[in-house]
Amino acid sequence: MLLLDWLYVGVFAVVGLGMAALPLAIVWALAPRAPYPQKRLTYESGVVPFGQAWAQFNVRYYLFGLVFVIFDVEVIYLYPWAIVFQRLGKFAFVEMLIFLVILLLGLAYAWRKGALEWA
Amino acid sequence: MNWGLEIAKAVGLAVVMFTFLAVVGAMFGVLLERKIGGWIQSRLGPKHVGPQGLLQTIADTVKLLQKEHITPRAADVAIFNTAPLIVAVAGLMDWIVIPFGPTLIVRDLNIGVVFFAAMASLTVVGILVGGFASNNKYSLLGGLRSASQMISYELPLAMALVAVAMQAGTLSTLGIVNAQAQRGWFVFLQFPAFVIFLIAATAEVNRVPFDLPEAESELVAGYFSEYTGMRFALFQLGEYAEMFAMAAMATTLFLGGWRGPLLPPVIWFLLKMYLIVFFLMWTRWTFPRLRLDQLLNLSWKLLLPAGLIWILITGFFITFF
């Protein structure tokens, strides 16, 4: 029952949100509220924070993000093959062998180009 | 098909599962963690609230419920408030496909394993936006580190899952447990996949030695530096739910799930799950933290190629022998 399965998933998401919000509602009812400007300052080890945190950060985070997207999409193709390749026999295996070798070549290329180096 | 009845059943199950995670997973998980930590470091751990400190985390929760929510003026309020909810819900969703026993499973989805991987990686969204919305330099760095770490280790994790799916010929978690009844536990047949899964799972739940996102000696508390009271507790809840889910998945995929002699299935399942949980806690109190470049090297230059090659080896043996 495919539809029923996903009904459960949907209900879990909605009820989960509700259950997670419940303690926040209790806090809203119970906890004190006494904000003042100094309390609402951003924490910066005890000194008055300077500037915004929304500034430039290391570009390498993007590089790893890009490589990840490529490989994650390729992994998705592996799942359906993993289930049926026993029935499809040698041909399916050889085909996937070629695909995986191309993947490994891509990884080697990214490695060689220095996309996987942090420093 | 009585849809009303099914919806009521689903709501009931979700409430029971969430309560189970909050009480058994988070509350007693934290207590267990502190007790084991105390034991490893030759001290007692929590001892004063209730018998042997059993009620310590419950007292902490009650205290947290009375604490003020502080929202920094510079924060992006809407996202700031949503982030802990995302993390908590992601921790809950994993448990839909975990089989506690032959019939004790919320839904045996036909894509169970993929669903698990997808929901487990949902946490990163909550952590990233939480760190970003705080508008705090430490939080931003913690969130970014967490994102790069979790996406890096998601690939080896997926490789391990694919190898197990190949061996079992199915993605359904019940099907994988049943396949292990015929072919023996996959921890033997798929030992490299088990090792890759354990390492990647530890990194996915941001635990020592992969706890860079919240490295307290450099980033205060990482992405949840600005979260106070119950919002902080929701992050913790999501994290512990995720850790127990990873242990439960390792049990399902590699340790034969609920199967075992004499004792009832649920007991066997919990025993094996707590064995893995104990292992995760043991590593936490034993190893120092990795550097960011070491962490990324381990994933991209060792685990990922190893996972790909292991898939090839598994495919080769299944096809030709």
Image: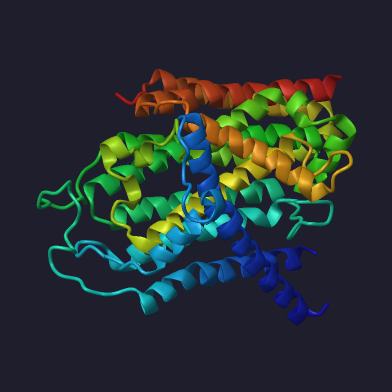
- Indicate the quadrant where residue B141 lies: top left
Look at the picture and state if B239 lies above or below B79: above
Residue drawn at (80%, 27%), measured in percent from left and top? A91
Q: Position of residue B219 (x, y in %)?
A: 28, 41
- Indicate the quadrant where residue B320 lies: top right
Decide if residue B136 is in sight here.
Answer: yes
Residue drawn at (19%, 47%), measured in percent from left and top? A55
Q: Quadrant of the N terminus of chain B?
A: bottom right
In this view of the protein, which residue sits in the foreground, A115 or A50? A50
Look at the picture and state if B310 lies above or below B157: above
Q: Identify the colour scheme used.
A: rainbow
Q: Position of residue A87 (x, y in %)?
A: 86, 35
Q: Position of residue B171 (x, y in %)?
A: 74, 45
Q: Quadrant of the C terminus of chain B?
A: top right
In this view of the protein, which residue sits in the foreground, A83 or B22? B22
- Indicate the quadrant where residue B294 lies: top left
Decide if residue A70 is in sight here.
Answer: no
- Looking at the image, residue B51 sits to the left or right of residue B43; the answer is right
- Looking at the image, residue B180 sits to the left or right of residue B130; the answer is right
Look at the picture and state if B185 lies above or below A32: above
